[in-house]
Amino acid sequence: MEIAVLGLPQSGKSTLFEIMTGIASRERFGEPAVRASARVPDRRFDELVKIFNPKKITPASVPFLDINATGEDAWGQIRKVASGADGFIHIIGGFAGGSAGEMTADYRKLTDELIFSDLVVIEHRLERLAKLQKVNIKPEDAMHADLLPRLKEALEAGKPARDLELTAEEQRSLKGFTFWTMKHELVVLNTHEESENIATSFVKSSGCSSPVIDIACQIEMEISHLPAAERAPFLKELGIEEPAFERIIRESFRLMDRLCYFTVGEDEVRAWVIPAGSTAPKAASAIHKDFERGFIKAEVVSYDDFISSGKAIASAKAAGKLRLEGKDYIVKDGDIISFRFNV
Ligand SMILES: Nc1nc2c(ncn2[C@@H]2O[C@H](COP(=O)(O)OP(=O)(O)OP(=O)(O)O)[C@@H](O)[C@H]2O)c(=O)[nH]1
Ligand SMILES: [Mg+2]
């Protein structure tokens, strides 16, 4: 589980990585891949910490990957270290005052590189399929013979694979491939502080269907270095409600198709990151494998119910908001849970 930071050379990848994670990857020159996590900003979590005042806190985090790759084979190196990423940030350098048109050209440059890489994979597979004897064709081969030419056509027209509408079955059949343009993408425009509405103009000129966030990295680096107490007044002065890098981290978390539930108490308040759609026993296994096997019930209250019924588990229970859920319950983002188990 990780999000790679990709972009053209000198676009601000390592700068953004440092703002989000606090790790200056440029100082680790010679390491092709630098990995570090960023805390996911979450007002609900902060509120729970205030309420329980626990000895230990563990917020949710997003693992990021920055790549130091240069020279002829830069793309080859990137492919090697980042092919397992769940998604990527595509950062575009516009801090010297780049227009939406120039940023669109940069966006196309890397996107075309990624598309080309996907086309090579498809060509290989289609060649192999063409050599198969009719009698040896398995259901998955038949699906690929139908799907891959469609995919190829879209890619050749400059469209990323993620823009194609695929059935769940088709998506499953592609699991074995690494298609870069199938991975979730977040576009980050690293702009000059005075570029207003640049994200809107960029979306218009590029036709990009991924989420787009603009950030002025230079200022945000200053913000990220400020002590917590000085941050709010500084933001107010700039007329900013929330730093862009916090939105970028949150949006990156969403790219991974994960959600979090909370466990609370005086010892620890913790956010547990699980795949969206997890059942209660699966969610419990994030805490301990034995919790899944010995699962009995989950005591659940949604964050909003917890707050509105008096900010305590006992008052949520008295208000009838604490539910006892069984093994088929699908955990929702922001649930506060306590598991009953038998091991
Ligand atoms: N003025 C200004 N300079 C920036 C900004 N973001 C990055 N830079 C500068 O641009 C240069 C490249 O930034 P990096 O973050 O190292 O870019 P990179 O994409 O990691 O570069 P490579 O890994 O070498 O491809 C550095 O000298 C940064 O200080 C910005 O928002 N404003
Ligand atoms: Mg770098």
Image (cartoon, rainbow, N blue to C red):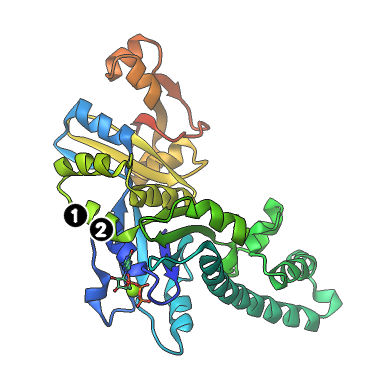
> On the picture, is 182 further left or further right than 75?
right
- Picture layout, residue 193 above or below residue 304: below
Q: Amino acid at mark 1?
A: His
Residue 290, which numbered label?
none
Q: Are marks 1 and 2 in contact (CB under 8 Å)?
A: yes
The spot of residue 289 in percent (x, y) is: 36, 46
The residue indicated by pointer 1 is 225
Q: Amino acid at mark 2?
A: Met
Q: Nearer the viewer, residue 78 or 289?
A: 78
Q: Nearer the viewer, residue 100 or 209?
A: 100
Q: Residue at x 80, y 72 (%)?
A: 137
The spot of residue 244 in percent (x, y) is: 36, 50
Residue 221, which numbered label?
2
Q: Residue at x 46, y 48 (%)?
A: 254
Quarter of the picture containing the C terminus is top left
- Picture layout, residue 339 above or below residue 232: above
State whether residue 300 appears in this view: no
The spot of residue 207 in percent (x, y) is: 63, 58
Q: Nearer the viewer, residue 205 or 120?
A: 205
Image quarter for ligand 1 equals: bottom left
From mark 1 to mark 2, how far is it between C-alphas?
6 Å
Callout 2: SS: helix
Instruction: Tell me where residue 201 sits by quadrant.
Output: bottom right
Q: Is mark 2 within 8 Å of ligand 1?
A: yes
State whether residue 93 appears in this view: yes
